[in-house]
Amino acid sequence: MLYLDDRLPVHPKILKAGQRIGSGGPSLALHLYVLGISYARQNLTDGFLPASFVSSCGVVSRSSLVAKVLSARGIGLWRKVKGGYQIHDYHEWNPKAATVKEKRETDRRRKALERGGRSSNLSTLDTSRTRARAFLKTTSTTKSTSTDAARRPTFALACVLMREALQQSWHLDHDGTLTNVGEHFKNLCAQRGLAYDGELVRKAYDAVEKAAFVRKRA
């Protein structure tokens, strides 16, 4: 992103350079000066502008003359150096290239870690759901008898049941509160011969809601 002083168009040095250039001078001086800052920011040159930038600049007419004036004594917006020009006081308003590169690398690593962590969490949750669905498919085809001991569902299975309970709660009652969802969860457990555990219900409810929030942000 390029930051410029809003007083730049009427800066005394820009106006003085324009007078030396002649017809349309202020506009040419301002244009080339801003293009120079943009080039240095994009290419992380720490304010250095190669001579090729000036000679190949097709946007500003008489670019070589304009560059010469910008670096002239008494104006000094640029400084003539070996191989090109150096923008005067560039780092007073713009960060050093090393700082920008370091920040970009830090951001890249952070985003990579976030993507990796999110993918890992969702992958683990999807795997657990797959196993739980397979278990449900098996248990749903087996008739429960009065002598069968109710089994406490695993956390992964509870999450699958919770998703179904949430869907029923919203579809039938338009109420997604824990109390209402818990009733549907209890009925689903009874249908499958599973023991109802209030503490497990709360944990499954929180986990499913959190997973839905992560998917929305992804």
Image (cartoon, rainbow, N blue to C red):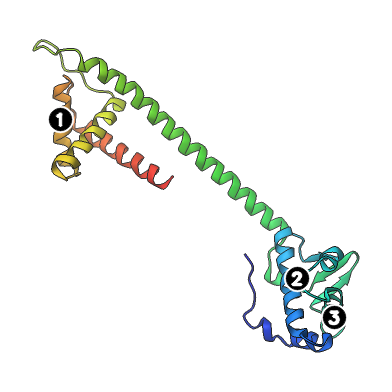
Which amino acid, mark 1?
Answer: Lys
Q: Cα distance, mark 3 to mark 2?
A: 17 Å
Q: Cα distance, mark 3 to mark 1?
A: 82 Å
Which amino acid, mark 2?
Answer: Val
> Local crowd at mark 3 within 10 Å, few (<14), some, or many (≥20)?
many
Q: Tag 3's secondary structure? A: helix
Give the residue number, with chain letter if any, for mark 2: 59
Could you tell me residue 137's position as x and y percent?
A: 26, 18
Which quadrant holds residue 180?
A: top left
Among the two numbered marks 3 and 1 on one chain, the one whose residue lies closer to the N terminus: 3
Could you tell me residue 141's position as x and y percent?
A: 20, 14
The image's mark for residue 69 is: 3
Q: Tag 1's secondary structure? A: helix
Q: Are marks 2 and 1 in contact (CB under 8 Å)?
A: no
Q: Are marks 3 and 1 in contact (CB under 8 Å)?
A: no
Could you tell me residue 217's position as x and y percent?
A: 41, 47
Q: Where is 20 relative to 70, above or below?
A: below
Q: Is residue 116 left or right of residue 208?
A: right
Return the residue found at the far right: 82
